[in-house]
Image: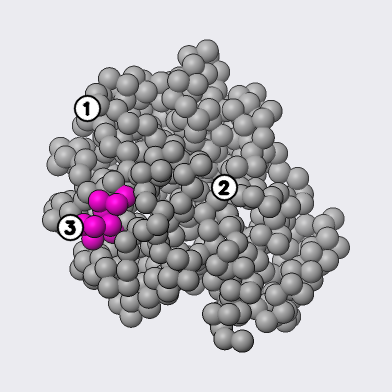
Amino acid sequence: MTHIEQLHSAGLFDTNAPRYTSYPPANHFGSGIGGARQAEWLRAVPDGAQVSLYLHIPFCKRLCWFCACRTQGTKTMRPVDSYVDTLLVEIDRQRALLPANVAMSRLHLGGGTPTILTPDVMARLLDRVFDRFDTGTGFEFSVEIDPTEASEPLLDTLISYGMNRASIGVQDFDPRVQNAIGRQQSFAQTHATVSYLRAANLRSLNMDLLYGLPHQTGPSLSASLEQVMALQPDRLALYGYAHVPWMSKRQVMIDSAALPSPQTRFQLAEQAREMLILDGFVPIGIDHFARPDDGLAIALANGHLRRNFQGYTDDTAEVLIGMGASAISKFPQGYSQNFPSTAQYTSAIGAGGLAADKGHVMTQTDLWVARAIEQLMCRFEINTVDLRAQFPTESCAIARTLSNVAASFPQALKYRDGILTLDPKFEPLVRIIAGKLDLFKSTKTAHSAAI
C-alpha cells in the first residue's frame, strides 16, 4: 500500500473534522451560559492577570462568496457607527466586572472588515479600549486589514495607536479564482498596503491564503505563492477552503463542479508547504508558517505554542475576552459566546446586561481532552505523563483513551517514554486522530474537511 493509499484508508479524503481551534468546537456550545455566568467568570479572573481582547466588527461592504464567517453587508456607515456605540458600552460593562489590575496581553480587531471604520470612529473605539485597559508585557495589537477597504488615514490611525501586527487576507491572486469566489483584490492593491505599513515600521505582517478554491491549479497556486513571498510576510496561514453552503448561504454562488477533488486539494497543500519551507518558513502545526525569528516559530521551539480561535498563537494568557456580536470568550471555567446577530447583540446590551447567549462549562474530562488535542495540534504529540500528573483523577481514563487511539492508528502513532508521537508522514491525519479523542464529535459535522 502506498503512502497516499494509507492516508486514504485512514479517511483523509472523505472524513470531515473540526479545525479544533477550541474544544469542544463552537458548534457544540449549548444554551444556559448567559450573562450571569459570564459575569461570574469575569469576576473570577485573578487580580494582576493578563487577558487577551478580541473585538468583532461583523460588517463588510462586499460579502465574499467563500467566507463562512458571521458578517453582514452594508452600503452605509450608519449601522456600523451604531454598532460601535454598543460595543463601547460592552467594553465598559465587561471591564467593570474585572479586577482592577488586569492588563492586556493581546488586542485583536477581527471581522468582517475592521478597516471599514472611519478614522474618527476607529479612534473612538481605541480610545475606549486603551482608557479602560492597561497593556501588559510584550503587548501585541493586531488588526485584520482588507487592502481594498483600508484608507491611508485609517492605517495612520491604527499605527498611531500602536498596531504592531497586521493580518492581510489574500486567498489567491489568480483573477479567475478571484472571480469564482467573489473577491477581487489585485496584487498591486495588496503591495501598496504592505509597502505603506512597512514604511511606517510595522513590526510584523501576517497573510492568509486558501487552497482548494474553484479553478485553482498547481501552477496558479504556485504563481500566487511567488507573489505572496515577494511581499515578505513574517507569518502565513494556509487554510483549506471549506465548502459548506448549507451553513453559509453565500457559498451557493460558488460552482461546486469547479472545486478540486480531495486528492488534488491534498496535492495543492503539499506543494504549497514545500514552496514555503524552501523559502525559509518554519512549518507551524497544520496550517501556519513563520519566519524563524517570528513569535510563532519561537513559541514552537520553546514549547509555548497554543491554539485559539484565530489559529496558532504565542499568547499565553489564560483568558480571552470576546466583545461584539458572535464573539467568543474563553475562561478556565469554560466558553461563552455572544448573541450571533447584531440585532440580538444590541438588544442584549441595551437591556443593561451582558450579551452572552450560549457556551460550555468545562468538566475535568473536557479539560484533559482539550489539553491533549491542543498538544496534538501544536506538537503532533501528547505527553501522557504530564496529562496524568495534571489531572490525577482522570489518570485511568487518560491511559485507556490514548491506548485506544494509538491502537486505531498503529502505523501513525508510536508510544515511547510516556509520549504518544505522530509519525511526520501521517501528520495530515492529525485532525482525524484528534477526532478520536473528541467526546462531542457527531457523525455529521459542520466544520471543514480534514484536508
The amino acid beneath tag 3 is: Phe
The residue drawn where x is 27% and y is 20% is 78
- Asked if the residue at tag 1 contacts the one at tag 3, i.e. Cβ–Cβ closer than 8 Å, the answer is no
Which of the two residues, 47 or 274, is positioned nearer the viewer here? Answer: 274
Seen at 52% across and 18% down, the residue is 348
Q: Amino acid at mark 2?
A: Ala
Q: Position of residue 2 (x, y in %)?
A: 57, 86
Residue wearing tag 2? 446
Label 3: which secondary element: helix
Residue bounds of the magenta highlight: 172-181
* Residue found farthest to the top: 351
**Amino acid under disc 1:** Asp
Q: Residues within 10 Å of mark 2 (few under 14, many from 20)?
A: some
Q: Specify the quadrant of the image occupied by residue 409.
A: bottom right
Q: Is residue 173 located in the magenta-colored stretch of the structure?
A: yes
**Residue picked out by circle 1:** 120
Disc 1 element: helix
- Give SS at disc 2: loop
User: Would residue 233 appear left or right of 251 to someone viewing this image?
Assistant: left
Q: Which residue is mark 3?
A: 187
